[in-house]
Structure formats: C-alpha cells, structure tokens
Image (tube, helix red, strand yellow):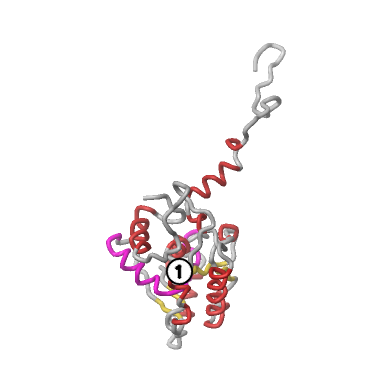
Amino acid sequence: MRSIAGINCYEMGRALQYVRVQNSSSVLSSLFNSTDSIEYYSSPVVLSQNFTQYTKTQLLLINFQRETDPTGIRSRIWEVFCDRATRSNFIKCINKSQGVDISVLPTIYARNRQYPFWLSPRGNGLDCHRTWEALYLGVIPIVWNSSLNSLYVNLPIIVINDYTEITEKFLLTKLREIVFQKRNNWPIYRYEKLKFGYWRRLILSKSRHAIRTTNRENQCWRAKRTRNGHG
C-alpha cells in the first residue's frame, strides 16, 4: 500500500483505499511518472459534479467523539447543531462511538462520503485525521483557523473562525465555488500534498542534503586546534 499522509494507515488506510477505488472519479487517480506522488492532479468528483442534487439534509456531516477535545468546542458544536429540537435540516449528525472496528470502516466511509462537507474540529491536538480522510474520499472538510492553515493551501478545504459561520447558504456558496474551480481552473488543487512523497521532497529540498557543493571551512561544528594541540 502506498504511503498516504495524515491518517493511521493500519486502522484507516486499507478501508479508505477500498472505498476510493469503488468510484473511478475519485480524487486520487492511478499514479504516473512517480512512485509516490502526482503533480497538480485534480478531478471533479461525483460529489462535486452533482451538487445541485443535494437536499437540505445532505450538506454537512457531523460525526465525531465529543470527549476527545480538551477545549470543549466539539461538545458545544453538538449542542448547537445536533441536540436541539429545531436542528438545522441541512446538517446530518451521527454520533461516533469510541474505539475503531477496522472491519466496518469501509461501510462507515461509504456512508459518510454521501455528504459533500464534513465538519472537522480539532481533537486532542490541533489536527484531526478526519480532515485528511475527507480529502482522500473527495469530501470537503471544514476546519478552524489555526497555525495549521499553511497545510491547507491549494487544497479544497474551508477554513472558518467560528461555527456560527455555518449556514445552508454559506455551504452552498462554497460548494459552487469549489466546483467552479475544479471545472474551469484545472489543475487548481494540489492533491499530491496528500502523499508522503510530497512532504519528503519538500523537507529534503530545505535540508543540507539538497546542497550540491559545501564549503566546509569555518563551520561552527569544525574543531579548532589550540596551542597545546588539543581540539
């Protein structure tokens, strides 16, 4: 199995791969001219192509454990969007149980990718594997403004400052914008950022391994000989 970034390969990788290959229009195509990455590849997925077919109950999926967030934002989101008797019709709330049953992950992914947006608030840390799962499956993740924003550049990710920004009109507008970009400004999204190969090359390009010629004189790590001959 090829390396993919942002997820636990043991628990999630094979299930994501299984669900993804069921749809030939998946975001990640067969790789070419590289062993682990694709350059500037973007393909409008079925979810985006058919956005006009979505009803009010099919726009946003909220599906996470509330207890894994030390800031309490997950619990607050659930209270606002899922617990109320007058919950919004365009949001689907599915409670996520604790633990991971690998055997049912393909079924869960197939169910969840019906929704064009997934809400992906922080978990124990700032990042959340849900963000990257969504991208692998052609879904648009919604994340919070944070120091991770640079990771999201050139990817179809919506960054918000507060959950109050989430409305049906907001989501439909963003969906149309992303579909337009995919259809008319190809290639617009850098899906190769979902591969470890992209980040490996980026890191190596900034490291000493990328320097072809090195002047080793007067380096800070070079030992200086003292008068008594000791370094």
Start-end of magenta stretch: 102-125
Residue 118 in the image, given as x and y percentages of width and height: 46, 71
Residue situated furthest left in the rendering: 103
Q: Tell which of 80 and 18 is nearer to you.
A: 18
The residue drawn where x is 62% and y is 33% is 212
Q: Going by the image, does 161 lie left or right of 79? A: right
Q: Tell which of 127 and 136 is nearer to you.
A: 136
> As displayed, is residue 76 above or below residue 202?
below
Q: Residue 101 falls in which quadrant of the image? A: bottom left
The residue drawn where x is 52% and y is 50% is 198
> As displayed, is residue 17 above or below residue 55?
above
Query: Are there few (<14), some (14-19), or many (20+) residues within 10 Å of tag 1?
Result: some
The residue drawn where x is 59% and y is 62% is 146
Residue 60 in the image, given as x and y percentages of width and height: 46, 76
Q: Going by the image, does 222 lie left or right of 181? A: right
Residue situated furthest top in the rendering: 228
Quarter of the figure with the C terminus: top right
| Residue 115 within the magenta-colored segment of the rendering | yes
What residue did someone put label 1 on? 45
| Residue 88 within the magenta-colored segment of the rendering | no
Residue 155 in the image, given as x and y percentages of width and height: 54, 62
